[in-house]
Amino acid sequence: MPSSVVVGGGAVGTAIAQTLQLSGFTVSLIDPCDAQRPASWGNAGHIAIEQIAPLASFATLRGVPRRLVAAHGGLSLPLRALPQWLPFSVRFLLAARPGRAAAGKEALRQLLADAMAAWERYAVQLRQPGLVRADGHFIVWSHPAAAERGRRNWLEADCGQAYFREASADEYTQLRMLTVKPIAGAIRCVGSGQIADLDVFATAARAAFLAAGGAMIRSRAVRLAHEAGRVRVELASGRHLDADHVIVAAGVGSRPLLEQLGHRVPLIAERGYHVQFGAQRWPQTLPPIVFEEDATIVTRFQDVVRASSYLEFNRPMAPADPHKWDRIEAVTREWGLPLAPRVSTWVGSRPTFPDYLPAIGKSRIADNLYYAFGHQHLGLTLAPITAELMGEMIRGGGIADHLGPFDLARFD
Ligand SMILES: Cc1cc2nc3c(=O)[nH]c(=O)nc-3n(C[C@H](O)[C@H](O)[C@H](O)COP(=O)(O)OP(=O)(O)OC[C@H]3O[C@@H](n4cnc5c(N)ncnc54)[C@H](O)[C@@H]3O)c2cc1C
């Protein structure tokens, strides 16, 4: 029976491990399971299939000055992290050129086209029929000028399999009951969705992996030892693991592992923050709401409401900036949202490449090495489809042509 080792037990690594189990492989999943929860369980829960345009574009660049100076623009470039974000910005500028942005959009369109269906298949595999809610999401604005600009952008945008429509009169009424600020405009996405609860997902995925005979190894991979064209995984515990396939899916932790081997991995930690509140007064089934002027998304999960924001380009382990949590809470209070007191805060890293495309492929350095990371703002959305593609690639034994845009060799 072929054996696989997956490094990284976030949403991407866990989904890959389970796909390989379905193919009859013996799978070990390595993760230190630190107290600091990774982005996979701290994110906004949005299945964002509408985001087919990579953020590496001139449109994003045009918004940067406003986002840096606005009261809550959500963008943060800490001076101490200049050595991290300056080289990233140069590469970002190159990737934002119209030809490359258009190619990136086509690549992401293909990947997102089947992402919702892949989630539905995954929910069946996990026996969690209520996990995926394909009810779309709202975007709202408080200023008429912002509403007009935002509406024009989204109603006319190419959103792949999703699209936006004006909020209905009933939906306006429902949204207005939630806020004290006037709502100048609201639209609803059709085709996007949310994961009903990320803790339920995490628990169900781990349990299903173990029930199918998977081995969960609580340790950190410190090195991929390269010998005779193959790698084996060295763990912090001192143990070594050999396998037919080694798949690195360790989010921002993937970079040092692959750079040691000679891969170029210009990945940055694009950190986000969330604040959670008691959900007693928040409607149970209301889809996520994006407050676009405040760069904040609010999502109802089973027991909490989570408000998430910020793109902070930083080192993964830099201390959190508590002002950002206060600022997120202030946004929710300014809108007058019906939230119970704050129950918890979190900061975590999106693994982001300068071209805002993930890395999914087979190493050109070691024969048994594969990788899947760098899913930026879309790692939750893309986890199941990434796992399916990885499964096909490993069963097929080669580099899949249609995954060319996601090959790490693009940075060589
Ligand atoms: C505030 C915020 C909101 C977001 N909202 C959304 C959203 O609504 N929708 C969406 O699709 N995406 C969203 N994202 C992005 C999404 O969360 C990430 O893209 C996704 O979590 C990446 O998943 P991953 O499994 O690749 O990495 P991670 O979630 O980072 O998991 C990586 C795992 O690898 C482990 N690891 C790291 N190094 C090692 C090592 N050396 N050895 C062993 N294990 C290791 C870590 O412990 C971790 O468990 C959001 C992100 C943030 C920060």
Image (cartoon, rainbow, N blue to C red):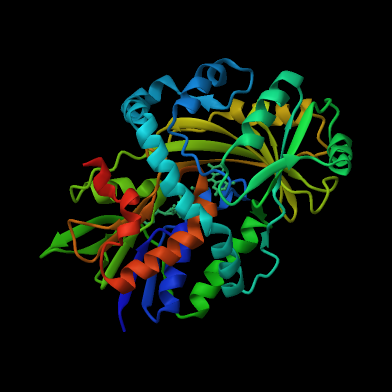
Farthest bottom residue?
Answer: 1
Q: Is residue 354 visible?
A: no
**Which residue is depicted at the point 72% across and 26% down?**
147
Residue 223: give x, y in percent of width and height. 24, 55
Specify the quadrant of the image occupied by residue 411: top left
Relative placement, left or right, of 1 versus 305 is: left
Please state, as top left, top right, bottom left or bottom right, where the C terminus lies in the image: top left
**Which residue is depicted at the point 36% across and 48% down?**
253
**Which residue is depicted at the point 86% across and 34% down?**
176
Residue 160: give x, y in percent of width and height. 55, 48
**Which residue is depicted at the point 48% across and 33% down?**
319
Question: How many marks can you see?
Answer: 0
Relative to 71, say whether 158 is above or below: below
Relative placement, left or right, of 80 versus 311 is: left
Relative to 246, say whether 304 is above or below: above
Relative placement, left or right, of 296 versus 183 is: left
Relative placement, left or right, of 331 versus 52 is: right
Q: Is residue 346 visible?
A: yes
Specify the quadrant of the image occupied by residue 26: bottom left
